[in-house]
């Protein structure tokens, strides 16, 4: 069975309306997926819920759709997880953001650590942030989420750590040599906010680890093996969702 295509539309949506889809969405629907008049769609704008719709007209650069019905459907994890990810080189950062969205992360904070190969500033940082927002929207389209996770503008890890944490937040930092294993932590994180700090290639510098601990981050390990930066955060997110989030629910789909 083919799933109905889902599209994020940054616009006002309401049942019984006819709308022209945004240009990028129209291109994807008409040119990439080659949809035709009468084909069903699901539209969402990030405000919650989704709308069933159908295409009523396709032209070269314009696709019109009739919005049929609003559905009160949410697929958010009850656990609010923030991924604090040191910038990764190449396409690793895109992949990490994409998969983190699929794993239910609520917020992503890209930070520049001392061992980050990628450096962003000025206009380049603005363009990359816009690109990452597109990655997030596409990931939500694929995985069924109707609310887009937040992503912050890149900044140095030291600057981010200088701000006091929210009250009651559980702060975790992956460290291969940590005394405590993630699975042995008490279930105190259930129903609370979690911040997960992941280093770049080569991990966090010793001074960064010390500063993170001073600001409340607890070093934990996943197991006996050292994971790459593009693996570590995603593995930890999956484990956190299984321990305290919604991966233990019977309604989880693969």
Image (tube, rainbow, N blue to C red):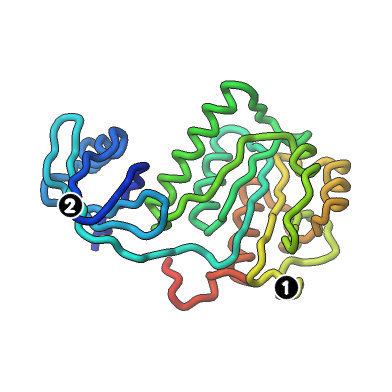
Labelled disc at residue 40: none
Exactly how many numbered labels are in the figure? 2
Quadrant hosting residue 126? top right
Instruction: Answer left or right for 119 relative to 238.
Output: right
Disc 1/disc 2 C-alpha distance (Å): 45 Å
Q: Tell me which residue sits at (50%, 47%) in the image.
A: 98
Q: Tell me which residue sits at (86%, 46%) in the image.
A: 211
Quadrant hosting residue 58? top left
Q: Tell me which residue sits at (69%, 55%) in the image.
A: 195
Indicate the quadrant containing the N terminus: top left, top right, bottom left or bottom right: bottom left
Instruction: Answer left or right for 155 relative to 75.
Output: right
Q: Tell me which residue sits at (65%, 37%) in the image.
A: 87
In-front residue for pair 120/150: 150
In-front residue for pair 239/147: 147
Q: Position of residue 145 (x, y in %)?
A: 42, 57
Indicate whether 180 appears above or below 215. Answer: below
Q: Position of residue 117 (x, y in %)?
A: 69, 30
Instruction: Answer left or right for 117 relative to 132.
Output: right
Residue with the mark numbered 2: 54
Return the residue found at the far bottom. Answer: 250
In-front residue for pair 58/11: 11
Q: Residues within 10 Å of mark 1 (few under 14, many from 20)?
A: few
Indicate whether 248 appears above or below 98. Answer: below
- Of the two numbered discs 1 and 2 on the same chain, state the one appearing first in sequence: 2
Labelled disc at residue 188: 1
**CB of mark 1 within 8 Å of CB of mark 2?**
no
Indicate whether 182 appears above or below 99. Answer: below
Q: Residues within 10 Å of mark 2 (few under 14, many from 20)?
A: many
Q: Position of residue 122 (x, y in %)?
A: 62, 22
Q: Position of residue 100 (x, y in %)?
A: 55, 52
Q: Secondary structure at mark 1?
A: helix
Q: Secondary structure at mark 2?
A: strand
């Amino acid at each position: 069975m083919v799933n109905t295509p889902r599209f994020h539309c940054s616009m006002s949506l309401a049942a019984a309306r006819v709308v022209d889809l945004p240009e990028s969405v129209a291109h994807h629907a008409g040119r990439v997926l080659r949809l035709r008049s009468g084909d069903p769609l699901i539209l969402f704008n990030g405000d919650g819920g989704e709308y069933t719709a159908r295409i009523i007209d396709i032209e070269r650069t314009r696709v019109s759709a009739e919005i049929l019905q609003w559905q009160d459907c949410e697929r958010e994890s009850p656990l609010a997880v923030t991924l604090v990810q040191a910038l990764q080189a190449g396409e690793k950062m895109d992949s990490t953001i994409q998969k983190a969205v699929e794993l239910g992360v609520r917020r992503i904070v890209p930070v520049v650590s001392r061992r980050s190969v990628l450096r962003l500033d000025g206009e380049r940082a603005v363009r990359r942030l816009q690109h990452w927002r597109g990655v997030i929207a596409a990931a939500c389209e694929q995985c069924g989420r109707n609310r887009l996770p937040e992503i912050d503008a890149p900044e140095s890890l030291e600057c981010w750590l200088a701000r006091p944490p929210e009250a009651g937040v559980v702060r975790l930092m992956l460290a291969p040599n940590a005394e405590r294993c993630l699975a042995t932590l008490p279930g105190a994180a259930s129903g609370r906010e979690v911040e997960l700090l992941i280093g770049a290639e080569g991990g966090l510098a010793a001074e960064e680890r010390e500063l993170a601990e001073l600001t409340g981050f607890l070093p934990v390990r996943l197991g006996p093996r050292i994971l790459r930066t593009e693996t570590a955060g995603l593995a930890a997110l999956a484990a956190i969702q299984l321990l305290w989030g919604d991966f233990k629910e019977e309604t989880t789909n693969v």
